[in-house]
Image: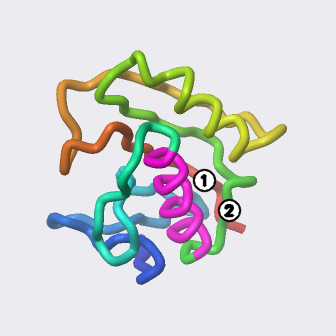
């Protein structure tokens, strides 16, 4: 196992890694809409989702991967009413690449974020 860390995404706010590589697969921890400096992004679900993807791009790059190699995403929403708006940002971010996905509503997310996303990706 190899721990993945980068200063281009927010540091872990608990006893966990930003991600791990095992057998050429990258497993990210959930990313919430914090900047790399650790500040919560202002705005609605669109802005928060965009920041989450910036964080995911950074940890994927540190792992030697990219969004193009994501095979599975897990999306956690604090309000399923935000699904369509989140999905629009998600679709724009991934383009023609459509990894497998789960999306669920949860009671609450860290720092009262509206969205948290984690990914599993191939590492070349």
Q: With respect to residue 14, does 77 lie above or below?
A: above
Q: Secondary structure at mark 1?
A: strand
> Mostly what secondary structure, the magenta segment?
helix
Given residues 44 and 6, the one toward you in this image is 44
Few, some or many residues within 10 Å of mark 2 (<14, 14–19, 20+): some
What segment carries the magenta color?
A: 47-61
Q: CA distance from mark 2 to mark 1?
A: 8 Å
Reply above or below: 100 against 97.
Answer: above
Give the numbered dot on residue 63: none
Q: Nearer the viewer, residue 12 or 22?
A: 12
Residue 100 visible: yes
Q: Secondary structure at mark 2?
A: loop
Q: Is residue 54 left or right of residue 10?
A: right
Depth check: give the residue in front, 19 or 86.
86
Image point 56% across, 72% down: which residue?
A: 63
Front disc: 2 or 1:
2
Which residue lies under the disc numbered 1?
121
Whether tag 2 and tag 1 are in contact, CB under 8 A, the answer is: yes
Rendering coords of residue 41 (x, y %):
37, 57
Report x, y in % for residue 1: 41, 70
Picture residue at 44% right of the left edge, 47% below the top:
48
Q: Residue at x 59, y 29 (%)?
A: 87
Q: Give yes or no for residue 53 being in the magenta stretch.
A: yes
Q: Is residue 7 above or below residue 58?
A: below
Which image quadrant is residue 107 in? top left
> In percent of the image, x 46 and y 36: which residue is there?
74
Q: Is residue 23 magenta?
A: no
Q: Residue 66 shows which numbered tag? A: 2
Q: As displayed, is residue 72 above or below residue 9?
A: above
Q: Quadrant of residue 45?
A: top left
């Amino acid at each position: 196992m190899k721990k993945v860390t980068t200063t281009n995404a927010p540091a872990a706010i608990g006893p966990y890694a930003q991600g791990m590589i095992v057998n050429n697969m990258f497993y990210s921890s959930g990313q919430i809409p914090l900047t790399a400096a650790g500040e919560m992004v202002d705005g609605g679900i669109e802005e928060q989702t965009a920041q989450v993807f910036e964080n995911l791009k950074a940890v994927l790059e540190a792992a030697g991967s990219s969004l193009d190699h994501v095979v599975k995403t897990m999306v956690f929403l604090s309000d399923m009413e935000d699904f369509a708006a989140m999905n629009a940002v998600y679709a724009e971010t991934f383009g023609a690449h459509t990894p497998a996905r789960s999306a669920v509503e949860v009671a609450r997310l860290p720092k009262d974020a509206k969205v948290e996303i984690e990914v599993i990706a191939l590492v070349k």
